[in-house]
Amino acid sequence: MSTPTFALVPSAYKLSQIYSPIPNNGNGDFTFIRTTVGTRFNKDGLIETIDINTPRLDYANEGCPELLMERASTNLVKYSEDFSQWSNQNTTDTPNAIISPTGNVDATKLESTTTSNNYISFNIDDVILTSTEYTASVFVKKGTSSIARLDIFSTLDSLIQGRVIFNFDTETISSIIGSASFKKYKNGWYRLSVTFTTNNTLGTVYYKIFQSSGVASEYIYIWGTQVEDKSKETSYIPSLLGTTTTRSIDRVNDLTTIDVSSDDWTLFINADYTDLNFSFGCISINDGDDDNNLRIMNIESSEEVRVTNRVGGTGVNNYNIFYGTWGYKLKIGIVSTSNGIDIYVNGQLASSQTSGRIDMSGMTNIGLTDGSGDNFLGRLKDFRYYDTNLSSSELIKLTK
């Protein structure tokens, strides 16, 4: 297989910069911007805080690191780890009882004192709006109880806005109000999430974590609570000082130092869109704006990735890659042809677009935007540009 002209395989970085191994003269290195700290899972499987303007190479999926790129988000829970600020109902909370997902001994033990209605709660009605979509999440670990429960509760008519019940022994969720999921991490920790849309009237709203075994003096461990106005949870945002806390968007600037004007070319990405929030973000070859480009754009609202050749502000050679067909983890190869482009997805020729050969002579930029700032969103594992046409067999192998 030919050597790519440019390749970004996330592995090395420093403040405000992501290094690309090809080319090795620095022309493929990206400028990175995030104006707040962020968190990631490090290679030991622990959550750690990453400094302002520092890329996040995330190991949440184990194996090789992925460049994590997210939109801005705000944790609306004002004390996300300090449960001494919360209110107990037939429970006691013991701080610093066990190692948390950070590797520090700062997780809380939540123990029941009666056989029912055992929870700890925090009032969030001052930051929750009516008729709005939110996702609530919490990290939980089994103690003596096999059951943990998360509710978002409104006092008006005693309505549950969102609910998920998790069984540690069977690793299943039930009694869902809204849509719910869980993720398993190292050291016995799970992250529970529930997405819901609030009613048009609310009253007082509480975030409640239950120890729900129905047995007194049983307990679970809890840590890292979060509520966001998102359709899925994002990376954990510590909110420790009694105020809501925001993580800003991850951004990179396009490269203008790679020659992308060849009529023969191949573009390849290996990306994970599983945790995608918001639409849309792009990877592209472009002429410095979004009117003329070849782009791979994610559209969360319709659950698809779209390959588009945009000419004079109009999309041609459009092909939609639906998550329901291909899944969220996508290897996409695009190769120029004499009358358009061929698109390979996860080891198959997915489409041949024949709206005409793309004029690349005016293309000057390549990067994680559409040319005007709509950044790629998701987890990027591999990004390559070849100034030649890879063969069908090479593309099938590359994208498999």
Image (cartoon, rainbow, N blue to C red):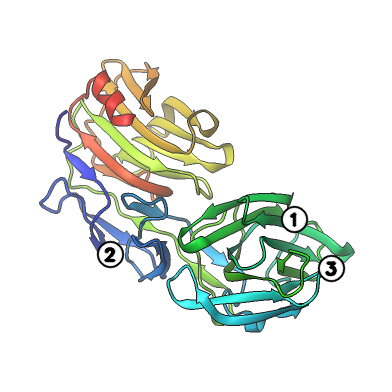
Taking the image as shown, residue 125 lies to the left or right of residue 137, namely right
What is the crowding at mark 1: few (fewer than 14 residues within 10 Å), some, or many (at least 20)? few
Identify which amino acid the numbered label 1 is placed on: Ser
Q: Is residue 238 left or right of residue 308?
A: right
Judge by depth and name the residue closer to the eye, 400 or 304: 400
> Crowding at label 2, few (<14), some or many (≥20) Cα neighbours within 10 Å?
some
Residue depth check, mark 3 versus mark 1: number of the one nearer the observer: 3
Between the C-alphas of marks 1 and 2, the distance is 38 Å
Quarter of the image for residue 141 reads bottom right
Q: Which residue is mark 2?
A: 16
| SS class, disc 2 | loop
User: Mark 3: which amino acid?
Assistant: Thr
The residue depicted at 21 percent of the width and 24 percent of the height is: 389
**Mark 3–mark 2 distance (CA, rounded to whole Å):** 46 Å
| Residue marked by disc 3 | 155
Question: At which x and y percent is residue 112?
Answer: 73, 74
Which is nearer the N-term, disc 3 or disc 1? 1
Q: Secondary structure at mark 1?
A: loop
Residue 49, image quadrant: bottom left
Residue 178 can be seen, yes or no: no
**Residue under numbered circle 1:** 131
Which circle marks residue 36 in the picture?
none
Residue 23 in view of the camera: yes
